[in-house]
Amino acid sequence: MKIILISSIILYQKFISPLFGKKCRFYPSCSEYSILAIKKYGLWIGLWKTLLRIIKCNPLNPGGVDYP
């Protein structure tokens, strides 16, 4: 399951993300953060941390460096 999810995120990074341009407030980007979190913490905790990261990505948050 992890491999399928990570593969779909990589496909998103290569084919869909370039259409929207660079707008991420954080480093690493949310999709890269997701891959790192899933590899480090496993599927469910990695997805939870990814969801929290996406919630933080809003105009009220200045962004910055945020590793999982």
Image (cartoon, grey):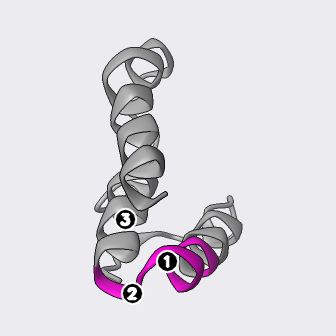
Identify whether 1 is placed above or below 66.
above
Residue at 51 percent across and 70 percent down: it is: 62
In this picture, residue 32 sits left or right of residue 53: left
Q: Nearer the viewer, residue 19 or 35?
A: 35
Q: Are marks 3 and 1 in contact (CB under 8 Å)?
A: no
Disc 1 to disc 2, C-alpha distance: 5 Å
| x then y, percent, for residue 9 | 43, 41
The 10 Å Cα crowd at callout 3, few under 14, some 14 to 19, many 20 or more, is many
Label 3 sits on residue: 33
Earlier sequence position, callout 3 versus callout 2: 3
Disc 3 element: helix
Identify whether 7 is placed above or below 20.
below
Residue at 64 percent across and 72 percent down: it is: 56
| x then y, percent, for residue 51 | 66, 70
Q: Give the residue furthest to the front.
A: 1
Earlier sequence position, callout 1 versus callout 2: 2
Identify whether 8 is placed above or below 2.
above
Type of the residue with mark 1 = Gly
Question: Residue 41 shows which numbered tag?
Answer: 2
Q: Which residues are magenta?
A: 40-48
The 10 Å Cα crowd at callout 1, few under 14, some 14 to 19, many 20 or more, is many
Question: Residue 46 shows which numbered tag?
Answer: 1
| x then y, percent, for residue 4 | 44, 45
Q: Is residue 44 magenta?
A: yes
Q: Are marks 1 and 2 in contact (CB under 8 Å)?
A: yes
Residue at 68 percent across and 60 percent down: it is: 58
| x then y, percent, for residue 42 | 42, 81
Earlier sequence position, callout 3 versus callout 1: 3
